[in-house]
Amino acid sequence: MSAHLNAALREGDNPELTEERRKATFDTRKLADEFFGSHLARRRREIAKAIDAIPELHDTKPLPFMTREEKVEEAARKVFTLSKHITDIVDLSNNRETQSLNEMVIGIEGMPISLHFAMFIPALQGQADDEQKREWLDRAIRMEIIGTYAQTELGHGTNLRMLETTATYDKQNKEFILNSPTLTSLKWWPGNMGKSCNYAIVVANLIIDDKLLGPHSFMVQLRDENSHETMPNIQIGDIGPKMAYNSSDNGFLKLSNLRIPRRNMLMKHAKVQEDGTYKKPPHEKLAYSAMVHVRSHMITQHAMLLAYALSISTRYSCIRRQGYIDPKKDEVKVIEYQTQQHRLFPHIARAYAFAFAGTESIRKFEIMKRSLEAGNIELIADLHALTSGLKAVVTYLAGQGIEQARQACGGHGYSMASYMGEIYGVGIAGCTYEGENLVMMQQLGRYLIKAVKSVKEGKKPTGYVAYLAHAGQRHSLIDCRPNEGYAEHIRAFEHIARRQTFRAAERLQKYENSGLSTEQAWNNCTVELNRASRLHTRLFIACNFYERVLDVEDMAVREVLEDLLHLHLNYELIDIASYALEAKKIRPNAVSLVDSWEITDREHRSVLGRRDGHVYENLFKWAKSSDLNQNDVLPSHKKHLLPMMLNARKQSKL
Ligand SMILES: CCCCC/C=C\C/C=C\C/C=C\CC/C=C/C(=O)SCCNC(=O)CCNC(=O)[C@H](O)C(C)(C)COP(=O)(O)OP(=O)(O)OC[C@H]1O[C@@H](n2cnc3c(N)ncnc32)[C@H](O)[C@@H]1OP(=O)(O)O
Ligand SMILES: Cc1cc2nc3c(=O)[nH]c(=O)nc-3n(C[C@H](O)[C@H](O)[C@H](O)COP(=O)(O)OP(=O)(O)OC[C@H]3O[C@@H](n4cnc5c(N)ncnc54)[C@H](O)[C@@H]3O)c2cc1C
C-alpha cells in the first residue's frame, strides 16, 4: 500500500510509529468502516472533530489525578455542557453514536445518566403501556427526569425470584405499598441511584391478596423534582468506592411503606386492574427485557474496551526498545519478540471477532423487538440464549485480553498513565453486572439441553443449534489441517462443541436416571454444561467472523481480515502457539490494525497509547502533574515520617 493511503500518518509523529504505518497493506479507514460499520465510522470522525472545537467538553485534568468527588463533579459538568450541544453533534435515537460521544467526552468511568439511557429508558420502552409512555418516557427522553433501574438487593442479585422488596396491592386505595422489610432487601448497586437520579424503576415482588406473583417493575419517585431532596418514606445514598467506575454513584435504597398509585406498575404486558384482578404477561420473562437489551449491547462495548487496551499496547510495543535479537545490532522494538506477538495478536483478532458478533447481537435484538411489537414471542428464547452466552464469553475473554495488553507494557502498564487499570476494572465489571457470567452460561446450557432433546426425538433444530443435528463427521482434531480452508476449521469447531454438548446432556440424563432430583442432577453437571455453552458461543463468534469476512469487498481489507480470521480459528481451536505463520503475516500490519479502530487520544486517556508515539516526554509531564509533586515535602511527611526519622537519629546519637 502506498503510504499516502494510510490516514493515520501525520507530520511530527514519532518516527518509530511512522515506520510501522508505512508498512500497512490496507487503508485503515476502510478497515474502520468494517469494524464499526461505515455509517458509525464516519459519524465517529465527525463527532471527534466536533468535540475538538468545544473546549468545555475537554478533560480539565487527567481523570486518575482526580478524587472521587472531583470525578463525579467532572462527569456532571460534562453531561450538563453536552446537553447544550448534543443535538448538534449526534442523532439521539442512535444508541451507538450517542455512546461514542459519551465515551469520547466523559470516558468509561461512569456518568450520572448512564443507567438513564442504558436501562431506565429501555425499560419504559419495553414495559410501559402507551399512556405510561406518554407520562414518563417523553419526559425521560427530554431529560426532565433522570432515572435508573433498581433491581439488585444487598442479599440477592442473581436469584430474582427471591427479591425481598415487596409491592403489595391495596384494593381500597388502589395503590401499591412498597417495602424493604429486611436489611438484605435494601436495593444495592443501581448505577446513579445514590445521588444523581430522581426516579427509578424498582423491581419488586408483587403481592395481591397474599398471593406472591413474582418480580414486576414499578415507577418510583426518589427525589423532589425541584429541590432534589429525598422523598418521604425513602432512604437513599451512595455505596462507596469501587474497583472502577468511580465517576458513578451506585446507590442503596430503602423503601418504608411507600405508597404509589396503581398505574405506577409498568403495565404493557402484566396488568393489575383496579379490583386487584391480575393479568399474566404473554411471556413470563418479558419483565426482564431491559437486561436483554443491555446484554445485547455489551458485546460491542467490550470489543471496544479490548480495542482501547490493545491499541495502547501495540503502539507502545513499537516505541519501546529493550534487548537484542541480534547482539551486533541495536536494541529491538519489543513487538519484534515472538512472545510479544503471541501475547497480543490473538487478542487483536478477538477484538475484531467480538465487534462483529456484537453488531449481530444488536441486529438480532432489533429484530426480536419488532417481532414482539407485532405480537410474536417466538424469538425471545433464542435471543436470551444468544445474549447470555455472548455476554459471558466476551466479557471474560476481553478481560483476559486487557490484562495481557497491560502486561505487554511492562512496568509503565501498571502506571495509571497507561489507563490500563481503569480499562481492566471497567471491563471485568461486565463479568458480574447484567447476570453473573457462570449463571448466564447456565441459561444458555438449558437451551442447549433442550436442543439435544429435540435432536434425540428425531427433530432438526434450526438456527444457531442446527449443527447439533449433524452426524459427527470427524472424530479428532488431529485431522484438522489449517490449509484446508476455513470451512474445515468451522466443521472441526462444530464437532468439538457438539461432542461437549452431548456429553453434558448424557451426564445430566445419567444423574436424573440415578434418582437425583432435577435440580441436584443439574448442579452436578454445571461444569460440563458451562463448557458446552462456552464452546457453543465461541463457535458462534467464529462462524459469524467467517461469514462477515466473506462479505468484505475491498480486497486489501479482506486479505488482512482473513489473516486475522485464520489466526483466530487456529488460536480458538488449538488454543496455544500454533500460529507462528499467521503471526509473521500480521506483524507488518500490527500498528495499522489498531489505528483502524480510530480511537482518538482524547478517548484513550493513555500516555502510552498516544497516536503520535511521543511516550517518554509525556510520561515525564504526567509525573510532574501529580498532586503529590505540588509540594517538595508532603505535609503528611512532615507530620509523621520526618519526626520519626529525626527521632530515630536522635536516639542513635545518644
Ligand atoms: C443506550 C444503550 C446502551 C446499552 C448499554 C451498553 C453497554 C453497557 C454499558 C454500561 C453498563 C453500565 C452499567 C451496568 C448496569 C448494570 C445493571 C445491572 O446489572 S441490572 C441487574 C441485572 N441482573 C441480572 O442480570 C440478574 C441475573 N438473573 C437473571 O436474569 C435471572 O434471575 C435468571 C438467572 C435468568 C433466572 O431467572 P428465573 O426467573 O429464576 O428463571 P429460570 O432460571 O427458572 O428460567 C425459567 C425460564 O425462563 C427463561 N428466561 C430467564 N431469563 C429470561 C430472559 N431474560 N428472557 C427470556 N427467557 C428467560 C429461562 O431460560 C427458562 O427457560 P426454559 O424454562 O428453560 O425454557
Ligand atoms: C459495576 C456494577 C454495576 C451494577 N449496576 C446495577 C444496576 O444498575 N442495577 C441493578 O439492579 N444492579 C446492578 N448491579 C448488580 C449486578 O447486576 C449483580 O451484582 C449481578 O447480577 C450478580 O449478582 P450477585 O451480586 O447477587 O452475585 P451472586 O449471585 O451472589 O454471585 C456470587 C457467586 O455465586 C455464584 N452463583 C450464584 N447463583 C448461582 C447459581 N444459581 N448457580 C451457580 N452459581 C451461582 C456466581 O456464579 C458467583 O460466583 C451492578 C453491579 C456492578 C458490579
Image (spheres, rainbow, N blue to C red):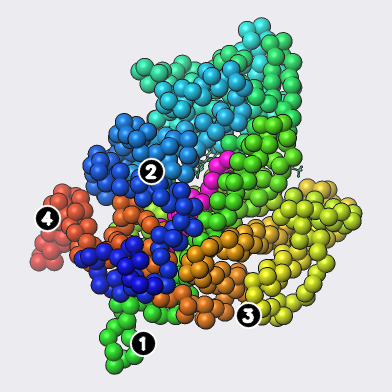
Q: Are marks 3 and 4 in contact (CB under 8 Å)?
A: no
Q: CA distance from mark 1 to mark 2?
A: 43 Å
Region in magenta: 293-311
Indicate the amino acid at tag 2.
Leu
Ranked by sequence position, the earlier of labels 1 and 2 is 2
N-terminal of the pair, mark 1 or mark 4, is 1
Residue corresponding to mark 3? 483
Label 2 CB, ligand 1: below 8 Å? no
- Residue 32, given in percent of the width and then of the height, sits at 44, 58
Please determine whether, in this image, residue 470 is positioned above or below residue 479: above
Disc 4 residue type (three-letter): Asp
x 42%, y 26%: residue: 143
Quarter of the figure with the C terminus: bottom left
Circle 1 crowding by C-alpha within 10 Å: few under 14, some 14–19, many from 20: some
Q: Which mark is residue 632?
A: 4
307 falls in the magenta region: yes
